[in-house]
Image (cartoon, rainbow, N blue to C red):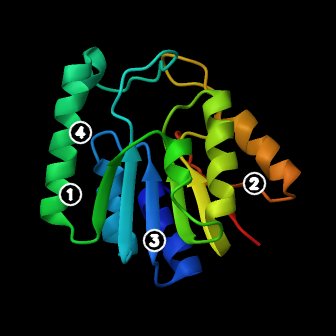
Amino acid sequence: MERTGWLTQVVKKQLGDIDTAIEVGVWRGDYSRTIIRSLEPKKFIGIDPWELYEGYTDKPGNEFKSQESLDHLYLSVKDSFEKDFDCAEIWRAHSVSASKHFENESLDFVYLDADHKYEPVRADIQAWWPKIKPGGILAGHDYIAKSHIEEFGVIKAVDEFREANNLPLCKTDEAFATWWAIKP
């Protein structure tokens, strides 16, 4: 199962009507659009800093050549989402600080696809898991050991989280797998 089909076959089936869906790590907004079209949430919030910062090495596109390029990308994504989707908000923020704007157990679905190193993934999971409603889903992309350019910490962070919370491993079977956890 690939991650587009996963949205309808797992997430939509589990959650039904979705009040709020969030993607952390929007980049160009491609998967955010897929989330909105597949899940039809009442509200979608896309969160990304669109910022070059110390220690961030997972730079997937040409926009990461300069801060000016990322500023332009942010404005382009924000404008297109405001035009195309009434339900969408685009926030320029870092993941953990953005999570503080939500009450615990208030969110249906959060998808993490930001910094893929161990500490940032661990911090993202710790910040967002309390925000998930019982029966809601916390998920993320790239449950893999490494990409073509660097080591990832996703597997280690997710496995520690799962084991600490006695949760099964749920993941798609594609090369850049999506993992998820349903909150009891």
Characterize the local packing of mark 1: few (<14), some (14-19) or many (20 or more) Cα atoms within 10 angstroms: some
CB under 8 Å between discs 1 and 3: no
Tag 2: amino acid: Leu
Residue at 53%, 40% (x, y): give it.
175
Q: Horizontal placement of 179 versus 114: left or right?
A: right
* Mark 3 or 2, closer to the camera: 3
Mark 4 highlights which residue?
A: 74
Q: Quarter of the image holding residue 130?
A: bottom right
As drawn, is 27 to the left or to the right of 21? Answer: left
Q: Earlier in the sequence, mark 1 or mark 3?
A: 3
Q: How far is mark 3 from mark 2, CA to CA?
A: 24 Å
Residue that mark 3 sits on: 20
Secondary structure beneath label 3:
strand
Q: How many residues crowd mark 2 within 10 Å: few (<14), some (14–19), many (20+)? A: few
Question: Marks 1 and 4, Cα distance to the nearest angstrom?
Answer: 11 Å
In the image, what residue occupies the spot 21% across and 46% down? 77
Separation of disc 2 and disc 1 at Cα? 33 Å
Helix, strand, or loop for circle 4?
A: helix
**Disc 4 marks which amino acid?**
Tyr
Callouts 4 and 2 close, C-beta under 8 Å: no
What SS does tag 2 mark?
loop
The residue sitting at 38% across, 36% down in the picture is 49
Query: Disc 2 vs disc 1: which is toward the camera?
Result: 1
Question: Which residue does the numbered mark 1 point to in the structure image?
Answer: 81
Residue tagged 2: 169
> Disc 4 and disc 2: Cα gap in Å?
34 Å
When asked about the image quadrant of residue 5, the answer is bottom left
Q: Which of 53 and 112 lies nearest the eye of the viewer?
A: 53
Callout 1 amino acid: Phe
